[in-house]
């Protein structure tokens, strides 16, 4: 299959887990469209969430590079901590490594692709279900109610492509099991690459970061199209780095034209920029001040309870 990675994790056509959609062998555009339709229909019918209309268990934060995915991940997990939720954050970005600083951690977790045993992932990935406390150190770092796991980083030009990293991320997010007041947040790689790897297929909520650039606004429509195609119902845009009302109005109009609903906004903030520059934590109370309304609107929409501060 060359570099093609089956979104369902099958090793090849006809192997375990293969639904024979034909995506890996499709050559013409018509064959590819027919195969993706078959794949999407299968994913929609076999979604994991017990009640995708109500529960928020797994959130994927998507959007253009630099739009603020990691910043929102830190702010949202902080806001959720402030109102009584534990979060397990999965960093699937194979290049940027600064998320742990935003979460106030002294060092990042050991990436899942660096067990030191070749291509072997950590043993806990073999479990059928993985509860938060079953993710073993040093592959997880915890600061109060926020834990961080990193799928993998490319740190050497000879380390090869990011396929293994995407595969570990897909397996982990699929197997992670949440209990009451626990939420998984996947801080996704930029663009729509991760959709091709099937990482979002296990998520019930997609948050799309939209910054004031036309590329970012247009990408939001594309991400929503891809997320809807795999049966995800809760897809919301978050406006970020908004400088004035004119920008906000323009972006909201463009999103409405594309049928993308907006959950909230984060202003362009000197505080966020300097926290980033000086590698300082975005504290839970700051997260609540900046993204508390996003967190509570999201939980209210899903009718989930939380502690009101
Ligand atoms: N609301 C905001 N105001 C000011 N700067 C922001 C804001 N959100 C993000 N940034 C800055 O933009 C840059 C990219 O943000 P980041 O969260 O790393 O994006 P991504 O994860 O999407 O690549 C960082 O320097 C970050 O500090
Ligand atoms: S892409 Fe489709 S046909 Fe190919 S291995 Fe995956 S499920 Fe099977
Ligand atoms: Mg990032």
Image (cartoon, helix red, strand yellow):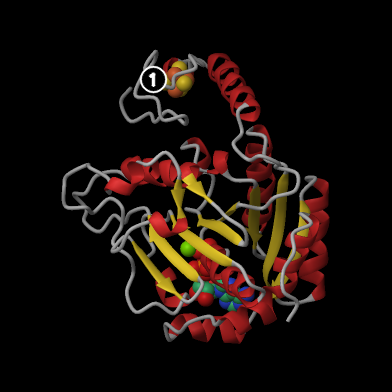
Residue at image coords 38%, 56%: 135
Q: How many marks?
A: 1
Q: In x, y percent, where is residue 136?
A: 33, 58
Residue at 72% across, 54% down: 236
Query: Position of 216 compared to 166: left or right?
Result: right
The image quadrant of residue 73 is: bottom right
Could you say which is closer to the camera, residue 241 or residue 100?
A: 100
- Which residue appears at 39% of the width and 44% of the height? 166
Query: Which residue position is annotated with label 1?
Result: 16
State which quarter of the image contains the N terminus: top left
Helix or strand or loop: what does disc 1 sit on?
loop
State the image quarter where residue 280 is shown.
bottom left
| Crowd class of label 1 (few under 14; some 14 to 19; many from 20; radius 10 Å) | few
Nearest to the observer: residue 83 or residue 118: 83
Query: Is ligand 2 within 8 Å of the beta carbon of the residue shown at mark 1?
Result: no
Q: Residue at x 64, y 23 (%)?
A: 41
Asked if residue 224 can be seen in this view, the reply is yes
Q: Residue lying farthest left?
A: 117
Q: x and y percent of residue 301 in the render?
A: 80, 56
Image coordinates for residue 109, horizontal then vertical, percent: 33, 65
The C terminus lies in quadrant: bottom right
Ligand 1 quadrant in view? bottom right
Q: Nearer the viewer, residue 89 or 250?
A: 89
* Residue 36 percent across, percent down from the top left: 57, 23
- With respect to residue 86, does 179 lie above or below? above
Q: Compared to 254, does 146 lie above or below?
A: below
Residue 251 visible, this angle: no
């Amino acid at each position: 299959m060359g570099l093609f990675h089956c979104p369902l994790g099958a090793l090849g056509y006809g192997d375990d887990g293969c639904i024979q959609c034909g995506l890996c062998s499709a050559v013409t555009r018509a064959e590819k469209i027919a195969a993706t339709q078959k794949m999407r229909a299968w994913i929609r019918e076999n979604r994991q969430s017990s009640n995708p209309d109500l529960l928020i268990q797994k959130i994927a934060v998507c959007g253009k590079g630099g739009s603020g995915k990691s910043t929102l991940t830190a702010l949202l997990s902080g806001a959720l901590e402030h109102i009584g939720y534990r979060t397990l954050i999965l960093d699937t970005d194979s290049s940027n490594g600064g998320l742990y600083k935003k979460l106030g951690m002294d060092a990042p977790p050991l990436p899942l692709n660096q067990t030191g045993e070749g291509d072997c992932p950590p043993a806990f990935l073999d479990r059928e279900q993985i509860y938060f406390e079953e993710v073993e150190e040093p592959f997880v770092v915890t600061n109060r109610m926020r834990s961080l796991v990193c799928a993998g980083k490319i740190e050497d030009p000879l380390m090869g492509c990011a396929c293994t990293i995407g595969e570990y991320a897909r397996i982990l997010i699929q197997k992670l099991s949440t209990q009451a007041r626990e939420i998984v947040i996947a801080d996704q790689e930029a663009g729509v690459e991760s959709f091709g790897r099937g990482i979002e297929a296990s998520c019930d909520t997609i948050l799309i970061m939209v910054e004031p650039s036309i590329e970012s606004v247009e990408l939001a429509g594309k991400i929503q199209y891809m997320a809807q195609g795999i049966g995800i119902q809760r897809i919301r845009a978050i406006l970020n780095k908004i400088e004035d009302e004119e920008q906000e109005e323009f972006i909201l109009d463009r999103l409405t034209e594309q049928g993308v609903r907006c959950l909230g906004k984060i202003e362009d903030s000197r505080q966020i920029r300097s926290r980033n520059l000086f590698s300082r934590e975005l504290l839970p109370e700051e997260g609540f001040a900046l993204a508390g309304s996003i967190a509570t609107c999201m939980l209210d929409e899903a009718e989930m309870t939380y502690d009101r501060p």
